[in-house]
Amino acid sequence: MKNKFTKLVITCCLLVVFQTTQADAVRDANQLLRVTELGRLFDSIAQQQTRDIIRTYSSIVSMSAEITLPQQVKQNIAACYAEAYAWENFEPGIAQILADNLSQKQIRLLIDFYQSRGLPPMEIQTFKDTIAKAALIRQISTEYIFDNSSSCVDRDAELILGYIASQRLADGPTLVEE
């Protein structure tokens, strides 16, 4: 009985230490995200992609229906993407991915690097090992974003088709001569 209790106490202590270490790693990962300004970059890329999508939609509608999408439709489309791809939706998951794939030493080394604190010569190999994980972290992060984002395509199609239909109704019935 005493032996089982001792094992339980040790297991509980290890769990507390692990949770504390994991919380510290996530906290450090969040700090790394702040110093790299990844959120600002993410938002900038999302905004550019949204502009590209709207430009493509406008071009398709103009060429196929000979209609120009009004600003209100474009703003509604942009609002969907702004909500679906807001950095706040992904930041906690990305921080967890960093914490799961980098050691605290590696995260802190990157924080120091991004804050222009330099790189100690004895940490060059750690830095190389950290950089070597970039492709894997990028892949995991991309999958996370894909799996945790909603699509605006169906809503976009409804908005555009609704607008085209309203314009055709406004133009009135077309008479076909024989």
Image (spheres, rainbow, N blue to C red):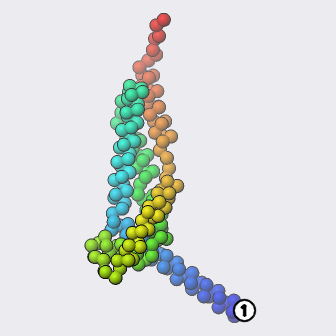
Q: Which residue is mark 1?
A: 1
Instruction: Tell me where residue 147 appears, x and y as whole percent.
Output: 52, 55
SS for tag 1? loop
Q: Residue visible at 44% across and 18% down?
A: 172
Q: Residue visible at 45% across and 76% down?
A: 103
| Extreme-bottom residue of the structure | 2
Nearest the eye: 124 or 167: 124
In this picture, is 85 found above or below 9?
above
Nearest the eye: 101 or 53: 101
Instruction: Tell me where residue 78 appears, x and y as whole percent.
Output: 39, 44
In this picture, is 13 found above or below 140?
below
Quadrant the N terminus occupies: bottom right
| Extreme-right residue of the structure | 1
Could you tell me how many numbered marks the image carries? Answer: 1
In this picture, is 34 found above or below 126?
above
Can residue 94 be spotted in the picture?
Answer: no
Query: Where is residue 89, by image quadrant?
Result: bottom left
Instruction: Tell me where residue 44 appears, x and y as whole percent.
Output: 34, 53
Badge 1: residue crowd in 10 Å (few <14, some 14–19, many ≥20): few
Query: Where is residue 69, by image quadrant?
Result: top left
Left or right of 100? Residue 30 is left
Q: Residue visible at 45% across and 72% down?
A: 102
